[in-house]
Amino acid sequence: MKKRIFSGAQPTGELHIGNYLGALKNWVALQDEYESFFCIVNLHAVTLPQKPEVLKQKSLDLARIYLASGINPEKSTVFIQSDVSEHAELAWILSCVARMGELERMTQFKDKGKGNAERAGVGLFTYPILMAADILLYQTDLVPVGQDQKQHLELTRDLATRFNRDFGETFVVPEPFIPPIGANILSLQEPTKKMSKSDENANGSIFLLDDADTITKKFKKAVTDSGTEITFDESRPAIKNLLTIYQLMTGKTAEECEANFVGKGYGHFKTETAEAVIEFLKPFQQRVKDYSDEDLREILKTGAAKARAIARETLTDVYAKMGIVGAAN
Ligand code: AQP
């Protein structure tokens, strides 16, 4: 039997090359080896305010991005989170297993709640519990994510272990898969923080659907460090970030990348990196046009049916172990 992977992205804003390099690229690479579940996590999206019509369309658009990235619906199960209500049910159960103190330590809540816990939504606070439910429902072995999700994964493991200890062996305790390169692509404008969909400064992110002109302009405006050398130097995060993007887009080794820019200036480096990104995104942007909303709905319906069957099996086991048995069954 193949081992399982589960991962997802929120249908909020525009996906950027950080999402692709940190997550989607690895999903595509792993889907042959693993039984794969890729979810569009629209219940996570509403932890921050969303416009209903936009959220609806974005959910379909994200499915389109998954497929254009190379997710094959014949091999992988692609579905929308809200189509499988077991996610919300298990999240409730796990919220009775999690501790306040554990959630208070989550740095993403501190960032997204802007340090104002009084005003932040409760859903934003319990977001990692819903994420744990997403993963544990499918008895997931491996979770391919970017660096920013590592802490949430650790909480997922803790909740699974605690539940197994208290109620008997129920959940597979999942392992994270965080790529050695590309797990934390930084903003082009503020290279101390990650590239982000919700960044107010759009120049910080290269979106997967940006046109060539926009990409060129964003790289031209990218912040650099002092000095002139173009090397993978930890102490110069802006240059290291641009070089990492160049490396992942061209498939060159680190040595080849550094050698390529010996004696060249930042202007040349930015132009060549922009060109590499534009070239890389060209076929992807073409493939995005291949799927109609109708095609996507069919794929998502099939995916949800398959996901639901597995999710229900896990939840039935959880309820039985906890003695949650209604009069109807
Ligand atoms: N900058 C990044 N570098 C590498 N990986 C990243 N991921 C996100 N940002 C980077 C990974 O992309 C996957 C899907 O992310 P998400 O939709 O759950 O959104 P997020 O993690 O909250 O980050 P975003 O895309 O920047 O959105 P906002 O602005 O809403 O926070 C995840 O595996 C994530 O690790």
Image (cartoon, rainbow, N blue to C red):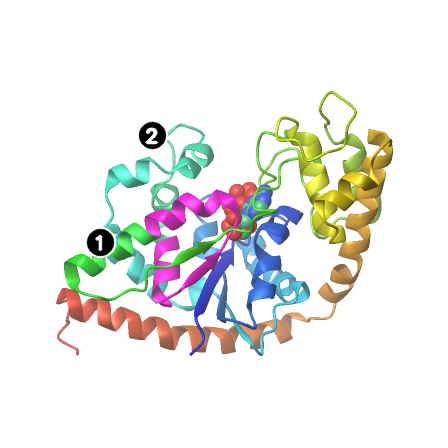
**Element at label 1:** helix
Pointers 2 and 1 in contact (C-beta within 8 Å): no
* Circle on res. 118: 2
| Outermost residue to the top | 226
Local secondary structure at mark 2: loop
Q: Residue at x 32, y 73 (%)?
A: 312
Q: Quarter holding the C terminus?
A: bottom left
Q: Residue at x 68, y 42 (%)?
A: 244
Q: Amino acid at mark 2?
A: Glu
Viewed as shown, does residue 26 lie left or right of 281? left
Label 2 to label 1: alpha-carbon separation: 29 Å
| Residue under label 1 | 162
| Residue at the image point whose x is 64% and y is 64% from the top | 64
**From the viewer's perspective, is 64 left or right of 37?**
right
Residue 162 rendering spot, x and y as whole percentages: 22, 54
Quick check: is 167 in the magenta stretch? Answer: no
Please give the range of residues in magenta: 131-156
Q: Is residue 206 something one can see in this rendering?
A: no
Above or below for 105 versus 89: above
Residue closer to the observer: 257 or 15:
257
- Please provide percent x and percent y for residue 21: 63, 51
